[in-house]
Image (cartoon, helix red, strand yellow):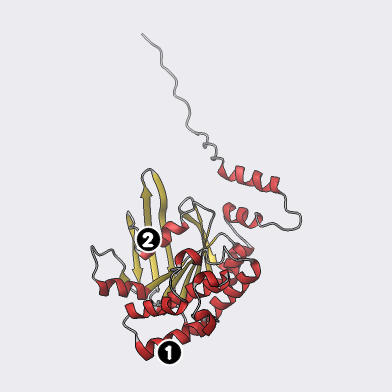
């Protein structure tokens, strides 16, 4: 069996009295695509921050390509660049994650400069990246505000790919786009994965999006993974009540909000205590 590209084992993270992650374990093979599904507050983004090194776990391990991905106090620039070549992230809102003052070309050139690529080689790489994400010369010379939402997200993907990462974390990367543009970006991501064999960790609350882009899926609730397995199997025949609730919550003909609310209330109601089978103690005679 090949070494996983990413291995997370027993990850825990607390913020004060709040347990954000509770014993989370997952694996992504080289070139694999894993979806993380759950509602707001389930721990998805906290997990992404730990993988990127923006926060540190209270317990558990993160291993990347067989080596521990541990925090280094005041890491040297070479260490930071090496980490960037391992994992990059694409955020939900590209308008906020792109520098509004510089062009698309300058955005990509800055990443390449940091990774010691310049001159003619950088020009060839920028052209290749733009072609990979379906952008041309006009978009290359544009500022972010001059582009559509879908075009900006393509720029964000190109910028992430400029570092040549092995894994791309996509945190609700199509949630801010309309349905037709979502489909274009998802097809683009599928094509990029086929061309580069990059791995994906796709975070979303949208089951249809996850079904389109991932091989396996992990369902998170209250900081824990409640169900994991092949995406098609989990979404077609979910075993956990919470996964069934997420699936039933997708609007469709015959969909009833009251049924969903009742199912959620039943899921959130603590199970009654199991009656004791021990015989009660009886008092003996007093003297």
Residue 148, given in percent of the width and then of the height, sits at 58, 71
Q: Looking at the image, do the residues carrying marks 1 and 2 touch, with CB atoms under 8 Å apart?
A: no
Taking depth in this image into account, of 120 and 204 the one nearest to the observer is 120
Taking depth in this image into account, of 136 and 125 the one nearest to the observer is 136
Residue sitting at the far bottom: 120
Above or below: residue 256 compared with residue 283: below
* First-in-chain label (1 vs 2): 2
Residue 150, given in percent of the width and then of the height, sits at 57, 71
Residue 149, given in percent of the width and then of the height, sits at 57, 69
Would residue 7 be found to the left or right of residue 156 on screen?
left
Residue at the image position 66 percent from the left and 57 percent from the top: 250
Would residue 284 be found to the left or right of residue 206 on screen?
left
The residues tagged by marks 1 and 2 sit, at their Cα atoms, a distance apart of 34 Å
Residue at the image position 61 percent from the left and 42 percent from the top: 265
Between tags 1 and 2, which lies in front?
1
Would residue 244 be found to the left or right of residue 53 on screen?
right
User: Which element is circle 2 on?
Assistant: helix
| Residue under pointer 2 | 50
| Residue under pointer 1 | 124
């Amino acid at each position: 069996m090949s070494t996983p590209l990413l291995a997370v084992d027993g990850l825990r993270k607390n913020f004060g009295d709040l347990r954000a992650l509770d014993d989370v374990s997952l694996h992504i093979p080289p070139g694999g695509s894993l979806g993380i599904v759950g509602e707001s507050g389930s721990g998805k983004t906290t997990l992404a921050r730990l993988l990127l090194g923006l926060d540190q776990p209270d317990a558990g391990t993160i291993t990347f390509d067989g080596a521990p991905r541990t925090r280094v106090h005041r890491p040297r620039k070479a260490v930071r660049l090496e980490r960037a070549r391992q994992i990059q992230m694409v955020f939900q809102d590209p308008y906020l994650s792109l520098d509004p003052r510089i062009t698309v070309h300058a955005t990509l050139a800055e990443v390449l400069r940091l990774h010691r690529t310049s001159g003619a080689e950088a020009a060839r790489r920028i052209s290749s990246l733009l072609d990979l994400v379906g952008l041309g010369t006009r978009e290359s010379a544009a500022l972010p505000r001059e582009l559509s939402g879908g075009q900006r997200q393509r720029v964000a993907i190109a910028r992430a790919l400029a570092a040549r990462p092995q894994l791309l974390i996509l945190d609700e990367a199509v949630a801010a786009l309309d349905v037709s543009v979502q489909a274009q970006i998802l097809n683009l991501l599928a094509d990029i994965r086929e061309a580069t064999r990059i791995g994906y960790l796709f975070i979303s609350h949208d089951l249809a999006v996850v079904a389109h882009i991932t091989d396996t899926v992990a369902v998170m609730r209250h900081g824990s993974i409640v169900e994991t397995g092949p995406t098609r199997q989990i979404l077609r025949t979910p075993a956990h009540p919470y996964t069934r609730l997420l699936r039933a919550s997708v609007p469709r003909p015959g969909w009833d909000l009251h049924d969903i609310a009742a199912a959620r209330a039943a899921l959130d109601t603590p199970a009654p205590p199991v009656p004791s089978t021990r015989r009660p103690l009886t008092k003996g005679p007093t003297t």
